[in-house]
Amino acid sequence: MDSGRVVLLIFLLVIMLLTPESSSPTQRKAFYDFIEVQKHRRDLLMNSSYENGPLDFEGISNPVVPLEVEKKVKELWSSQSLADDKNDISFYRNITGFMKGEWNVLDLGLAPMELTHSSEYRERDHSNDTATIGNSWDGTEDNRNITDSEGFIAIDINESGTGPVHLVEANINVQDRKGLNSHDIPLRGVHFVDSGNVVLSSTSRKFAGIFGVPFFTLNEAMYNQSLAPVLGKINSTIAGLDEMFEHDVTPPSGGPTGSSDSCEYIVYLQVHRSDVSAEELSIIEHELRFPTGQPHQDIPKVILTSFLYSPNCGISIESRSAIGDKIERYWIRANNAAVIGALLTLIQIWLLIRQMNDTNTPSTVSKLSFWTVGMMALVDGYLCMGYLTAAIFIEASFLPFMSVAFLSFLLVSVFGMRYVVLIYRIQRPERRMQQQQQQQQQQQQQQQQQQQAERQFQPGTLPLPVTAIPQIATPNLGTQPEDDSRSDLSLLYSRFYFILLAVIFATLNASTWPKPLRNAFQRTLFFSVNSYWVPQIYRNITRGCRRAFRWEFVFGMSIIRLAPMLYFYLFPGNIILHDLDPLWAMIIVGWVWMQLCVLVSQEILGPRFFVPSSLLPPSYDYHPIIAAPDLESGLTNADQPTVSNGVNGSVILAGPIDCAICMQPIEIPRELMSNNESNDENGGSSGISHPSTASAILARRTYMVTPCRHIFHSSCLESWMRFKLQCPTCRNALPPL
């Protein structure tokens, strides 16, 4: 397709996506009727009085609450009564934040009441669900019928306004102790800042909660104070709806709401008084909102006592103390988390650059596990998306989280994926050889099966000669065309980003699961992403390599990558408000520590020390046991040492021993064996025992013997093999470490 047509097609698609969706005539008529109902409710509220009570409001009767509820509310509000001296009032004037606590059911003997209908009430036509104002007024599809007796409660409050009465929007999440049942209750109401009283209500088509909030205050003075702010909020919302209607824009839909079985709630909150004086608390609030560096006392927590009442379901719930921080404290913690995340990401970049510089030859890269580095890059990409999400949802910390997201992007795209591609290219011939070996084994099996089939077709006769058996044409594996590197790289990138997106979508989907399933998914994910050293341990075993990564890289990356998990499981003020789980944190730390111990043991005791020899693939041992024929008679004075094979796979050595790389003598550990313990084939002493103690095993690590029987210092030959897999003396090929 012509490039101009592609650009035109993309431009048209963008225009179609950005063009507001117009309403159908039916939806437009339903939207108009809905706005008129809200205006009618507003007019009723403007013309009402506390003495006459609510008139013609959906779901609100007169009296608005039973006497048992009114008594409970007065008891709740009197628990934090004002002092005689108003200068000692120390309530937070703005309680925007997130509080968590426990709840339990109260038995007040209240029966469910049928909600009353006004003259303007109409049954909802579910065929026009899009013609609602959704999130502005209606609730959710959840019927919010709480059937458990106790559990956990989370209160998310957003407060705005000035003066003695502030407007409040809140969402209360109520769940049982096991987390199997969870209900979200969206609420709106007012906060009386001088007394710390908060009145909230849910709103739907069958319950005009926001219009009845002034009546829910149960006090004429509070009714008069709250009437103006509530009317102001209603007028601004209706004005926004009128503007949407004039521009023929379909309003947002909240889904099917206002069903006959959904529970509506009236919520009363009481803010606890703080321990500091009113003047000091005012300084703290001003410093949190507009920081100037003014010293102040420790910031007190926000503590709420709550009472939830559902008139149509007869539910009464109490929460004694939901504790949390103001939103400004949350922003400070979020900024600190972003700064620490940026610092840890910079350390990871520094460690990765040093590791890449250390493994700059094919022989050193061949030791690395492709899956270990790939898993690290995948986790870095996952964290990068997490930082981007935090930057979007935490507006006050947008720049810090965008900065750490950019650093994470550099880590995964510039350095991490570059390292993954390098390992993939270097190890491509190894994978191709393995594929060829598998093909050869399959062909041999097919030949054997055909030979058996030939014998079965001729019973009672002698086997056919080899020349009579039809031969299978085998492809010439040595002349296979080279793989297209570009196609391999594109396939590698596509698989990487596909797995990354799959993990992200699985995480988002798991966030809506019940708590037990969500915790199981999180624990499985944390356990999997912290198993990145397992592939390297396996590669060390298969290739006989003792060490592939720098120790500073191994321990540094292990500690840094444990930090996010420990932050969520051990820090009570984490930014995602994750529940603490010290036991699982200890399990993950122990699992990573076990992997590190295995890597260190492979360096000291050998890569295969814990695996039975019957399960191991063949691998050359650069640290064999060296034996001398007779140490008491002394070594020969030849210019070159004599090296030959001895019994039990040992190496028999005689003569002076010098390293051909550094030209320094090599100290060979020897342990004399008594004559009655072992004799050689000629009846003489075999001279040296086979060291099996830990000290002897460690001593053998000081020298290395090549397959061509040349001896070097371990450090010298390892440094040589970082650049060339050839013997420094005879130039024969050497197996990788």
Image (spheres, rainbow, N blue to C red):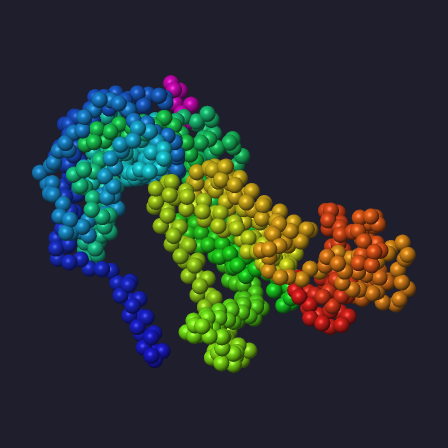
- Kindly identify the residue that appears in the image at 44 percent across and 61 percent down: 497
**Residue 222 picture location, percent across and down:** 26, 28
Q: Main secondary structure of the magenta part?
A: loop
Relative placement, left or right, of 145 versus 3 is left
Query: In the image, which residues are magenta?
Result: 83-92
Q: Quadrant of residue 311?
A: top left
Query: The C terminus is located in which quarter?
Result: bottom right
Q: Is residue 331 visible?
A: no
Instruction: Tell me which residue sits at (45%, 44%) in the image.
Output: 523
Residue 33 among those drawn in magenta = no
Question: Is 524 displayed left or right of 346 in the figure?
Answer: left
Q: Work out whether 543 lies above or below 82.
A: below
* Residue 400 locus on image (x, y percent): 49, 51
Which residue shows up at 64% across the image and 61% down it? Answer: 619
Q: Quadrant of the N terminus?
A: bottom left
Outermost residue, left direction?
Answer: 119
